[in-house]
Amino acid sequence: MTTSVTQSQISINNPVISDSRLKPTKKTVDTVSLALILVFSLGLGAVLGLTFITVTKSELDAPGGKSMFLGNLTAMVGTYLALIMLILISRNYIMEKVLGQDQLIHWHRKIGPWPLTLIAAHVVLTTIGYAQAAKTNVFHELSTFISSFPNLLAAIIGFIFMAIAGILTIKYIRERIKRETWWSVHLLLYIAMIISFAHIIGLGPAFVGHPLATHLWALVWILVAVIIFTFRFAIPIYKNLYHNIRVHQVQIVADNVTSIICTGYNLQKLKAQGGQFFYWRFLTKKMWWQAHPFSISSIPDTNFIRLTVKNLGDYTSELSNLRAGTKVYVEGPYGVFTKYRQLTRKALLISGGIGMTALRSLLEDLPTKSQPVVINRAAIKDELVLHDEILNLVKLKKGVLHEVIGSRADINFNGAMIKKLVPDLFKRDVFVSGSQEFIDYTLYLLHSLGINDDYIHYEVYSL
C-alpha cells in the first residue's frame, strides 16, 4: 500500500473551469425532485379526472360498462406513465444537471412495470366488457376488434413491442445481453407509443365526442415529442456541428486500457465538469450506430478533450483501432458526480479499477490546496490507471494518496482500513467511482461506519 506523492507530467494539463456554473446543492435537488413529483402528480390527477368526468352512470350500468370503464381507466393511466418514462430518459440537461442521469433512470425503471401492467389490464378488461355487451365470448370479441376496429391492429403491435421492451428490463435478462441489443430493443418503446397514438385518440371513451379533451391530450403528446426531439436530437446535432470533434490521438496507457484524445473547436464551451460523462459515438463503419457512456478523464480545454476506457467487450476493444481524424459525435455532458455536490470543505475520493478515470477529472476540478484524500483500489499495480497524473494532481492539491493493491484474499479492504487511512473521515464528503459491484460494496462500508447519505456521492450511468 503506497501513501507517497511524487512529481509527474499530466498528458493534458487544463485550467480549472470557473465556479460560475450551476451548483446543484442538496436543497436544489430536493426542490427540483418535489417540483417534478408535484407536476407529474397534477398531470396524473388531470388524467384521472378526465376519465371520470367523461363517463355517465347509464354507461356504467350497461352490460359490460364497468369493465369497459376500468379498461379505459387503466389505458389512460398506463399511457400517461409511459409518457413520463419517456420524459425521464429524454436527456433533458436541465433535469440531468440537478438530479443526475442515474437518478432519472432509477425513477424510469421504478415506473417501468406499471404502464405495461396497466395496458395489459386494459386489453383484458376492454375485451371482457365488449364481449359482455355483445353477449359473446372473449376470443370472438378479440377477433372482431382486430378485424373491425380502426387502428386496433397497430395498437396491439405497439403493446407487443412494449411487452418485449418490458421483459428485457428484468434485471436477470438485462445483465445477460449486450448493451447494443438492449439499446436497440429499447427503441421499441418509442415505436409502441407512436403507433398507439391514433388508437387512443380514435377509440378512447374519454376522447370520442370530447374535442377539448382530445386537443389537450394531443398537446401533451406533442410536448413530450418536442422535449425528446430537442434534447436528444436538436441540441446534440447543433453542438456537434459547432465543435466538430475528431479523434486526435489514441494512446495505450495500460493493459486493455486506452486513452482517446479528441480535438475540436472551443471545447471549453461544452462546460464539462470533472467527474461528468458524455455519450460517445465514433463515426466508423462498425461503430457509428452505437453511443456509449464514458466519463472524461481530463477536463476539456479550448482544443482537446479526453476519455480513457477499459476493454470490456466488442465495442471497447475497437476503440484502440480508431484512427486520427475519425469524426466523433457526443451527447452531454451529463452527471452530478462533481465537486458541486460537496457539503464540506474537504473530500475523500475512492475509486476501483477504471473508476480512476472519473476520479482523475474530478480531482483536477477540485480547488488548489483543497487537501483531498484519494484511495485507489486495484488487484495489481498495472490496474492503477493514470497513476502518474493522479499523483501529480494530489500533490498540486496538497492532498494524500493511498494505493490499496492486492487481491481480495490478500487485502481486506474494509471500514477499519478506511478509518485508519482517513482520520478525519467524518469531516469530508466521499466520492466513490468504479464498477457497480465496487460502488455497492464501498457504500456498504461507508454506511457501516455511520456516514450519512448526504455526504456520499456516486453515479452509475447506463441506458
Image: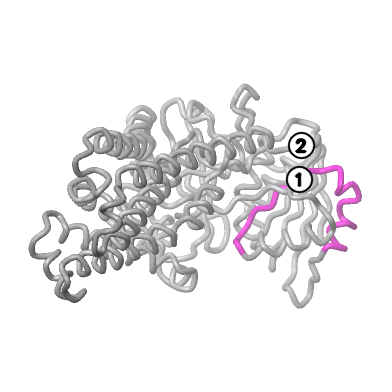
Indicate the position of residue 264 as horizontal and vertical percent values: 41, 32
Question: In the picture provided, is 311 more to the left or to the right than 447?
Answer: left
- What span is colored magenta in the figure? 415-436
Q: Quadrant of residue 240?
A: top left
Q: Residue at horizontal 41%, vertical 27%?
A: 265
Q: Does 152 sit above or below residue 10?
A: below
Question: In the picture provided, is 345 more to the left or to the right than 19?
Answer: right
Q: Amino acid at mark 1?
A: Tyr
Question: Badge 1 is on which residue?
Answer: 455
Quadrant of the frame with the C terminus: bottom left
Q: Nearer the viewer, residue 27 or 414?
A: 27
As drawn, which residue projects farthest toward the top? Answer: 20
Q: Residue at horizontal 19%, vertical 65%?
A: 133
- The label on residue 343 is 2
SS class of the residue under badge 2? Answer: loop
SS class of the residue under badge 1? Answer: helix
Question: In the picture provided, is 284 more to the left or to the right than 280?
Answer: left
Indicate the position of residue 315 as horizontal and vertical percent values: 40, 60
The coloring applied to the image is one colour
